[in-house]
Image (cartoon, rainbow, N blue to C red):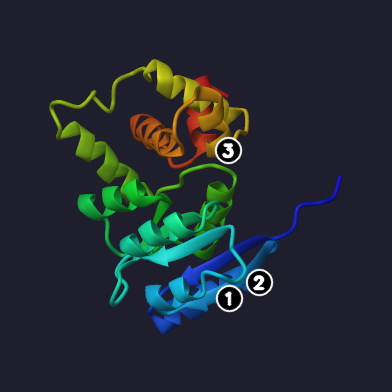
Amino acid sequence: MAEAGPLRVSVVEDDADIRAMLREVFTTSDGFRLVNTYRSSELALADVGTEQPDVMVVDVNLPGMDGIEFVRQMAERKKGIQFMMYTVYDDDKRIFDALRFGASGFLLKNSTPDEIVAAVREIHDGGAPMSAAIARRVVDHFKQRPSAVPILEEHLGEREAEVLKLLAEGLLYKEIAAQLGISIGTVKNHVFRVYAKLQVQNRTEATNRYFGR
C-alpha cells in the first residue's frame, strides 16, 4: 500500500508576524506541506482554482470579508476542505456562526505550535478540536438555554452515542453521514454536543472518557 502524502495546509491570516509563525510551523513539522498563505479572504478566494489544501487555518477577524464569511463561501466552492478557525475571540456568536458555516475546529491564538499541529491533524482525521476555553463556552451556551437538552447530563443521546462509536472506529464525518443517513453538518452538530457534554477537545479524549479506555 502506498503511503499517504503530506497533509496539505493553507493559511488565511492578515497579521504578518502570525502568518510567518504559521508558515514556519507547517514548513518545519513532519508530515505537512504548506500550500500557500494569504493575507485576506479575497486573495484566498481568488486563488480557489489552484491546488486544493486538505485543511485551511483561517483567522476570524480578517479585514474586508471576515473569516466566517470566507469559510461559508469557500465551503460552497470547494468540497472536501476542512477549516480550522484561529482567533483571539471566543464569543458565542462567532463560535456558532463559524461552526454552522463549515468550520470543523476552533483554536485560540494563545495555542502553542504543538497544539496547532495536533489540531490540524485531528481535523484531517475527522475530529473537531476546540481550545479548552472554546469548549467551555459551548458548554455554557447550552446550559443557559432552558429549552435545550441539558448539556452536562450523564449519558449521551442515542444518536450522539452512535456518532461517537463510529468516531472511535476511525470513520470520517462523510463516512458517518453516509452510514447513518444524515448530513455532514448534522454529524458535526452531534460531535460538538458530544465534546461539550463530555468536556473534551478531540475524538481520542471523548472515546477514552465515554468508553473508559
Q: Earlier in the sequence, mark 3 or mark 2?
A: 2
Which residue position holds label 1? 24
Residue drawn where x is 51% and y is 69% of the image: 48
Give the left or right position of residue 2, taking residue 36 as reference.
right
| Residues at marks 3 and 2, CA–CA distance in whole angstroms | 27 Å
Q: Amino acid at mark 2?
A: Thr
Q: Amino acid at mark 3?
A: Leu
Q: Position of residue 171 (x, y in %)?
A: 60, 33
Residue 54 sits in which quadrant? bottom right
| Residues at marks 1 and 2, CA–CA distance in whole angstroms | 6 Å
Decide: is 109 above or below 84.
Answer: below
Q: Position of residue 149 (x, y in %)?
A: 24, 23
Locate the N terminus and report the quarter of the image it occupies: top right
Locate the C terminus and report the quarter of the image it occupies: top right
- Using the rendered image of the protein, determine whether residue 108 is visible from the camera's viewpoint: no
| Residues at marks 1 and 3, CA–CA distance in whole angstroms | 28 Å
Which residue position holds label 2? 28
| Mark 1 element type | helix
Q: Amino acid at mark 1?
A: Glu
Residue drawn where x is 66% and y is 63% of the image: 32
Decide: is 139 above or below 76.
Answer: above
Q: Position of residue 89 (x, y in %)?
A: 27, 61
Which residue position holds label 3? 172
| Mark 3 element type | loop
Instruction: Say if mark 1 contacts mark 2, CB within 8 Å.
Output: yes
The mark closer to the camera, 1 or 3, is 3
Residue 45 sits in which quadrant? bottom left
How packed mark 3 is, by other alpha carbons closer than 10 Å (few <14, some 14-19, many 20 or more), is: some
